[in-house]
Amino acid sequence: MKNIRPIAFWPPVILFVAACVYNFQNQKGFTRMINDANSWLMSNFAWAFSLGVLIMLTVVIYLMFSKFGDVRIGGREAVPMLDDVRYFSITLTSVVAIGILFWATSEPLYHLTSPPQSLKITPNSPEAAVFSLSTLFTHWGFLPLAIYAVPSVMFAFSFYNMRKPYTLASTLTPIFGDKVLGKWSQVIDATCMYALIAGMAASLGTGVLSIAGGLKYLTGVQTGAFLWAMVDIAVVATFVISSITGLFNGIKKLSEINLAIFILLAVIVFVFGPTFFMLNLGVEAFANHLDTFFEKAAFTGAAAGDPWAGSWTIFYWCNWLAWAPISGMFLGRISYGHTIRKALFIQFVLPALFEIIWMVIFGGAAINMQLSGGGLMEAMSAGPEFAVYALLEKYPIAIFTIPVFVFCMFLSYVTGSDAFTTTLGGLSTTGISPDDPEPSMLMKIFWGIVIGTVTWVMITSAGVDGIKMLSNLGGGPALILELLICVSLLKVASKPKVYDYRKHDYTDDGIPIKSVTKKNIMSEGTNDKASKQKIS
């Protein structure tokens, strides 16, 4: 207890206990309160979310092609703690895998059958099919990955190169100086922790429902509070155990298995599904995505009074932003030893391309089946989590693919929760540094129990939507924080030598010196413990 950062730790805990109690006492009042708050946020600040996301994308692209991209995280002698494949697998499975498993099949069906009224697209038409898939590229492509990349790069540079403390406030020191590292740092961390805890609980709740739906398909057992509790306990216990074993002994192995299963599932659906329809629709939809990129990214529906954007695009921007600051801390932490450009390629470019391909396969298959009278919308009447099982059931070897998909869903939630539990634990306590980056075992167990309990309470009472709304309320403060981080990044990128602890890594003109070879590293030696953590 003596190591707890009180301002960062207690407010999120107290707020969630209060939310659960209020939900039990007055569920209608709780739902009305958070719905009203979200409606106010969406309707008044849709413009800010849309512009903010586009600004972040612009900053990330600029960084990739600037001289700042040559800067190595941790110094030019730093050895990557993860090779490229493991770095990518952890990034993908801890950040976006959960979402694409759940939404790749169900979301395109909503857009196909209920496109925005203001666009006057006929439901279930060819135009609706193209709109549906191209909208997936907007919601799950380069824009959301840019939201994550901004705090990731800035935190990695501030933590490893500037040698600042393990707090989100460190990303703001180029603007405000070290005075922001006092109590203000705990306030910033508490706000982002609140948003992430709600997001994790909402995500876990979605996962519990999805896994329970898969078990129902496999065994016929009825879903309900008891089955949800059993799945919840299994997921929480697994990710807590994985988290306790340390970053590389737990999440590294889980993410590698998870990535292999992702590729296997994609290949199966691509081969046994409507292959040429997927490819043809995918090319057409991607062209439409490029043509309408800014239109879709900035669509608010205000002129026509269309609520579609608030339910989908703006809702997504809020949700991505609520997760991004603390997710970025985790991604920044595992970026040690890579250049800024390499980190952005693996965190930003590759996952976005993977998601687009995944959406072409699963989204294209779902659209084709619905247009052919496959009845996927009827299957979703019991919940969106049933769409993918209804899809896989129509394909050969469903007896194999459905259990594998359920297992992949389980692993995805475990992997993501493992990463974020470790980050929450680090923000809750003092003493986290590059040389000692792991929080205590008890802190990881505590956050695992909190998230699992909040998840079960919410899905058995208010449902997942209620806690999603709680998470989204963190999108407003996160937007302000991320825009400030953008300013920090641009300031650092213009003169990295001024801020880098290792001045000798630059020429007199401030140009980053190319990294030394591994042979030179071994001969020169290093006292940096983090650089010795390379996984062969």
Image (cartoon, helix red, strand yellow):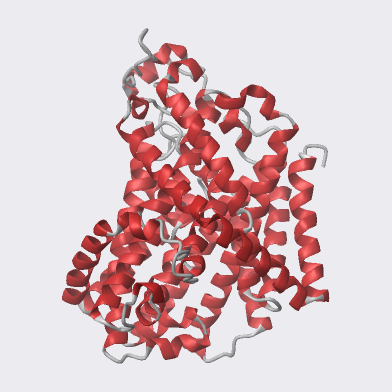
Q: Return the x and y of residue 175 as percentages of the image width and height.
A: 57, 26
- Image quadrant occupied by the C terminus: top left
Q: Quadrant of residue 379?
A: bottom left
Q: Return the x and y of residue 340 as percentages of the image width and height.
A: 38, 32
Q: Tell me if residue 517 can be seen.
A: yes
User: Is residue 21 shown above or below 86?
Assistant: below
Name the foreground residue: 13 vs 402.
13
- Image quadrant occupied by the N terminus: top right
User: Is residue 214 shown above or below 163?
Assistant: below
Residue ID at (48%, 64%)? 302
Q: Quadrant of residue 260?
A: bottom left
Q: Tell me if residue 237 can be seen.
A: no
For residue 435, side relative to residue 340 (left or right): right
For residue 85, side relative to residue 51 (left or right): left
Q: Return the x and y of residue 125 as percentages of the image width and height.
A: 27, 82
Residue located farthest toward the front when viewing the structure as drawn: 303
Name the foreground residue: 457 vs 465.
465
Residue ID at (52%, 88%)? 382
Residue ID at (51%, 17%)? 501
Q: Return the x and y of residue 32 as percentages of the image width and height.
A: 71, 73
Residue located farthest toward the top when viewing the structure as drawn: 508
Residue ID at (74%, 52%)? 12
Name the foreground residue: 226 vs 254.
226
